[in-house]
Image (spheres, rainbow, N blue to C red):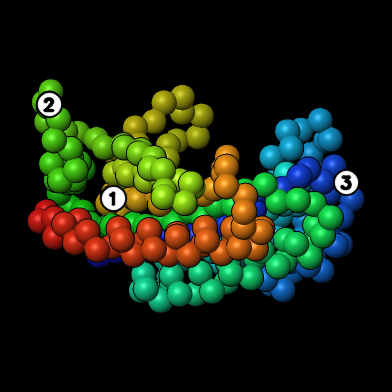
């Protein structure tokens, strides 16, 4: 399997900004250069949950989503010709500057926690085999699962969380994905069979999440905590990539 970086998302959680919906121009002035796009309001009422998006800046590959209690920056490399290593270098260099942008936009708010999520794809080249989904599920299951089996593995979805030595969390989620394309169905049809659509891509999706939610040791300042989370995310991705067993799966 060849590894591809799908996206990296950085989340900065902070005290709520209840006046956020009135700050559309401020958001564009602060984050517009990061995304190279305009800021747009989602027009949600004040009664909406604090984590619901209020302002969105959507660029070609960069996105900023502003909620009352968090700011999310995402860099997407879907369909990019960049290698995983090149994409990671670009993404982590970009999110290193997110802290300063959010602090500039919310200078009077305290930051509560930080998180970085890396999404990796391990696509399968040969997708003409109708049994390829079962093959991927079986191969990966045999690699990482040693418990009792109850038949032929036909799907895979696993999520595990680990406590880090510094008090944060490293979480991993794995699942087999498939992408299909074609006409969904005739107009007015009540039922559709998605399995009849052409199989475009299939593979293993891996999500690596590092965060410091509920951190008890607050001896570091906000900037130092943000740097620790982003640095550990880099290390987590690197540690996972060293597991060459995934790349050696013979399908």
Of labels 3 and 1, the one closer to you: 3
What is the number of the mark on residue 19? 3
Q: Which residue is mark 1?
A: 204
In the picture shown, does residue 57 fall above or below 89?
Answer: above
Does the CB distance between marks 2 and 3 fall below 8 Å?
A: no
Looking at the image, tell me whether mark 2 or mark 1 is earlier in sequence order.
2
Identify the element where label 3 is drawn. loop
> Which quadrant holds residue 243?
bottom left
Q: Residue at x 67, y 71 (%)?
A: 34
In the picture shown, does residue 100 fall above or below 16?
Answer: below
Q: Residue at x 41, y 43 (%)?
A: 163
Work out whether residue 251 or residue 216 is closer to the camera in this orientation and state it. 216
Identify the element where label 2 is drawn. loop
Identify the element where label 1 is drawn. strand
100 displayed left or right of 43: left
Q: Which residue is mark 2?
A: 148
Q: Position of residue 99 (x, y in %)?
A: 66, 64
Marks 2 and 1 sit apart, C-alpha to C-alpha, by: 22 Å
Label 1: few (<14), some or many (≥20) within 10 Å?
A: many
Q: Position of residue 212 (x, y in %)?
A: 54, 48
> Which quadrant holds residue 79?
bottom left
Label 3: few (<14), some or many (≥20) within 10 Å?
A: few
Q: Is residue 205 visible?
A: yes
Looking at the image, tell me whether mark 2 or mark 3 is earlier in sequence order.
3
């Amino acid at each position: 399997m060849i590894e591809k970086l799908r996206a990296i998302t950085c989340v900065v959680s902070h005290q709520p900004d209840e006046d956020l919906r009135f700050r559309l121009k401020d958001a564009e002035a602060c984050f517009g250069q990061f995304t190279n796009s305009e800021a747009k309001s989602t027009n949600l009422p004040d009664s909406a949950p604090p984590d619901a998006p209020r302002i969105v800046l959507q660029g070609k590959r960069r996105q900023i989503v502003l909620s009352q209690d968090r700011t999310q920056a995402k860099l997407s490399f879907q369909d990019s010709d960049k290698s995983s290593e090149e994409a990671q270098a670009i993404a982590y260099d970009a999110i290193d500057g997110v802290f300063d942008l959010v602090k500039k936009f919310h200078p009077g708010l305290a930051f509560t926690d930080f998180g970085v999520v890396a999404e990796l794809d391990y696509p399968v080249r040969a997708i003409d085999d109708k049994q390829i989904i079962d093959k991927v599920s079986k191969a990966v299951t045999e690699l990482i699962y040693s418990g009792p089996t109850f038949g032929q593995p036909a799907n895979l979805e696993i999520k595990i969380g680990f406590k880090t030595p510094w008090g944060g969390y490293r979480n991993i989620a794995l699942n087999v994905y498939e992408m299909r394309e074609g006409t969904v169905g005739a107009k007015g049809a009540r039922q559709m069979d998605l399995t009849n659509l052409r199989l475009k891509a299939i593979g293993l999706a891996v999500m690596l999440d590092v965060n410091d939610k509920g951190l008890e040791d607050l001896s570091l300042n906000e900037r130092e905590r943000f740097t620790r989370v982003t640095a550990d995310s880099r290390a987590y991705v690197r540690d996972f990539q060293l597991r060459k067993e995934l790349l050696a799966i013979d399908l």
